[in-house]
Each structure stands twice: as structure tokens, then as C-alpha cells.
Image (tube, grey):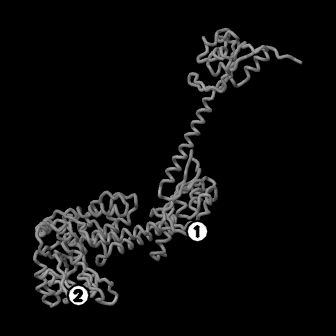
Amino acid sequence: MHSISKSEMETILNSTHDGMIAVNADGVVTLFNKAAERITGLNVKDMMGRPAVDCIPNTRLHIVLGNGVPEVNQRQQLNDKAILTSRVPVLDESDRIIGAVAVFRDVTEVTALTEELSDLWKARSLLEAIIESTKDAISVADEKGNTIIVNSAYTRITGLPKEAVVNKPVTVDIAEGESMHMKVLESGKPVYNVHMKVGRAKREVIVNVAPIFIEGKIRGSVGVIHDISEIIALNAELAKAKKLIRQLEARYTWDDIIGNSPAIELAKEQARRAAETPATVLLRGDSGTGKELFAHAIHNASQRSMKQFVRVNCAAITENLLESELFGYEKGAFTGAEKEGKKGLFEEADGGTIFLDEIGDVSLSLQSKLLRVLQEKEIMRVGGTRPVSVNVRIISATNANLKEKIQKGTFREDLFYRLNVIPIRVPSLREHKEDIQLIAEHFIFKLNQEYGREVQKISDDTLKNLMNHNWPGNVREMENVLGMAMVTMRPQDKIMEAGHLPLMAQEATGAVPLVSGAARALKDVVEEAEKAAIERALLETKGSRTKAASILNISMRSLFYKIEKHSIK
């Protein structure tokens, strides 16, 4: 058998990836291979024939020589490198220690990868904890369209357990509609506010999905699902609360009455003086001038501010219903009445203020009962036999000429004088046009919050048009006009230009009507403007609904819904 020569042995030892160092019984280095040179940075010529303890940092070969105990897989730091070392004694046939050998490798990269992997797992755990803690339903898909992560909110909304969707196609949760995950993975573009139905119960939801890009390539998508039924319930609850607040609390103060013109300052000064007294107040002025704001502000500035404020629109309720609403009724008073009877609004406002809007529309029979409240400080419930004392301050408002109504016999003169103890006339907008800029800026701030816009100012041309208009609908008309203008503006527009105003045919000079007809509810005006904006977008894009949706900054689904809603062809 051929024996291995010394040169062959050196070749073998120098070919291995692991570093090797050997010492004899005296601790002198007898072997120092190429890998040992590479890992330690030491030169073999400087090592050979020298005691290892003198020339090799952190060596423990002399300790192994001394105790004969092997040290296996010991982690050690060598300069900026992490190494893994095994040291064993070398024994002769009589088990005497005649030397020691250290075999070691550089594990710096492996350690770094291990730490990086550990960090990744920690990051994943943190991400999953964050996703799990949110109330929004979240699903994450990989680039192949398979679901990889869902949270508990997702399973609650869809009714599907995690094991039914994880590692399954993203389409398994869809009851009606197409997969937005797949759409995003195909297009690489996010989608927003898409209406869908998911899960066994076909819950109606709104879905937002965004792509996940890693190093420029799409690697998945993340979706957030909102349960519309919950939102609808919350909106109903909020509307109910707002209705209650509107009826039982005064929301406005002097700061909400915008303007510093002489006409407005005179009305505010009269109202401030009225607030200091318990006397009845009659607010006169055209529709839309802000008479209700004055009523709120007077109550809030009075000694009754901590009590309830009840608003009643006398023109919006039929005569029979208005009587039972104002004065209440006893049980069994009429068919459909509540079994236990009901307190009226005068009793609800006891200690506070009742605001009777459109007082000129109250019938003569009801006027006599109001006169009794003012004279006797008591009311009689419908179907009742005994009076109920009330301590209420009455503020009334009208846009009618009550003196003409007195002459025609449709309004009681004695009631008029009881109501008109402190008369305050709220001026029409055309009488204080110098306040138009302040009022417009106030409405823009308010509408920005309502519509989620960021309009910063109105242009000089726009202001000129506003100043030139006669404003038959007063401040309410201005709010409608600015609301319509904001709807027609693009989301990125910051300045309201003259061209944004509704039904524009404005010229540089002269007053041009901004809207046609009488003032209307803001909701109706906004819907009309929305329809016009959609028709204009379709016209500009030659009927392309995709481009129109992009211009309007709404989803295709929303555009189709609005086209059908407004019967646009």
C-alpha cells in the first residue's frame, strides 16, 4: 500500500476549508494550514516552531495539552470574526499526550444570516400582532393569488375560519363580485371603495386593496375590508344623536354669526342686550338670513344656557300634530296616542328656551293657546283637565309681515305684542355685502371638513361674482352655491375659480345670476351638481367611463352606481 508523503499530506491539509493548528507536547506550533492563515490573518512562517501561546491570540491549545480535556464546538471571537473551534489532545499508543490540534471555521456570515433570520421572524411576529390587534379586517395575498395572512376581524366579518382561507385562492371568500386582490396583482394599481359581498352570510363590505412591491416587483397585495352594516348602524345612531342635539341643545354662539358690517353689528348688539333679559324676542328677516343662529346665540348667552333649547319649525308640522307636540297629551287623548301620554316640547324646555320658527304660519286656534302660555305661564295637555306650569323663555322668528297678517285677521294682535317685546331684524345679505368675503371663507372652511377637500381660498374673480350677485336666498343660498362649486372642483384644486360656480355664464363685469330659481335644500343642489360633473367628464372623455372615473377620482363601481342613480345616458 502506498503511504502518504509529507508533501501530499500538506496538500490535503491546505485544501480543506477549515483552519487547522497543531502543537507538539511542548506547545510549539507544528501545523498551520492555508485556511488558518486566511481566517486568523497570520503568516505561517511566523507561526511555525514558536509556542502557540506566544503567537496565536486567544489560543487554548496549551490548556488542552495540560488537562487533556477536549473542547468541542466552542464559539470564539477573533478580531472581527466569529469562529467555531474544536480542540482535542493527540495521544500516543500509551495514551500519553504528545500534542494538541485545533480545527476551526469562520461562522461570521452564518451568524449574521441567523440573526437576520431571527429579526425577520420577530418582524413577522410583530406584523401579525399589529394586524391581529386592529379592528379592520385584513387579508394578505402572495403574488400567485393565494391568501397567506388574515386576522380575527376578517374571520368575524366573512364567517370563514383561517384554515378555510389561508393557503387557498383569494376568491374563496367572495359571495358576489370579482376578486380585488387578483385585479391588483394583475394591474399593480390599488383599488379603493369597492362594494362587494363576502362570506356565507353575504355581508356587504367596502374593500380597499393595495399592491406590495419588493425591489420593484409585485410580491403580493394587502386588502382592508370595512363592514358596511356596522357603518350604517353607526351612521343611524349618529343621525339620531344629531337630531336630539339639534332639538335639545343650542349649538351656535356669537362667534358663529359671521360679519362685522354695521348692519350685522347692530343686530348682534340688540341680541346681546336681549340675552341679558328673560323677555320674549321676535326675530324678523328674509329666509336664509340666519335667524336661527341668533336664537341659539341668545340662549347660550343667557342665564338659561345650562338648560335645554328646543327648536320647533311651526311650518313643517300639521296643526293637529303641532298642538300635541307643543303641549303634549294625556293617555287615551286620541287614537294612536302613547298609552302613558306624552310630555310636550314646552315641558321639555322647562327652565330653558323654546324657539318657534316660522311663527307666522301658526293657526288662529293654536295662537290662542300660545297666548295663554305667555300670559299664564302654563299649558294644557291635549285631552287634559288641569294646567301644567312651565317656565320657558320664548324666542320666535318669521319672514312674514305679521302686521299685514294682523290686518287680514290671520294673526292675533295681542299675541304679536306679547312676542314682539324685543324685536330684532336680521339683515338680508344684500344689505351687508361687505361681509361676503368673511362669510365665504367661513363656508369654505366648513365645506372642506364636510367634503374632505383642501380648498385654500377663492379667487378675486370668484369674489367679484359673489359680490355682484343679489342673493335672494341670502346666506343659505351662498352656502348652497359654494357647496355646488366645491363638488364640481377636482380633489387637487386649491383655489375656487369663477368657472367652478354653478350655471356659470359669468362675465368680467355686471351681476350674473349664480343659480336659477329659489333657494333649495343643499342635498338637492349637490346632487344636481354631481350629475352635471359626471356628464361633463363623460363629454370630455368622449364617453369613456374608465377615463371619466379617473378624472372624477372615484372607482368604476361608484361611477356606474351614480350614472344609474342620475339616469345618465
Pick out the residue farthest to the right: 1
For this rendering, which residue is in front, 387 or 364? 387
Circle nearer the N terminus (1, 2):
1
Q: What element carries label 2?
A: loop
Q: Name the residue under label 1.
A: 200
Residue 466 pos. (x, y %): 26, 67
32 relative to 485, above or below: above
**What amino acid is found at the position of numbered circle 1 in the picture?**
Arg
340 relative to 188, above or below: below
Q: Name the residue under label 2.
A: 384
172 relative to 342, above or below: above
Q: Residues within 10 Å of mark 1 (few under 14, many from 20)?
A: few
Q: Which mark is residue 454?
A: none
**What amino acid is found at the position of numbered circle 2 in the picture?**
Gly
Question: Residue 409 appears in which quarter of the rendering?
Answer: bottom left
Query: Do the CB atoms of the residues marked 1 and 2 lie less than 8 Å apart?
Result: no
Residue 498 pos. (x, y %): 32, 64
Q: Residue at x 63, y 29 (%)?
A: 107
Question: Residue 54 appears in which quarter of the rendering?
Answer: top right
504 relative to 457, above or below: below
Residue 275 pos. (x, y %): 13, 68
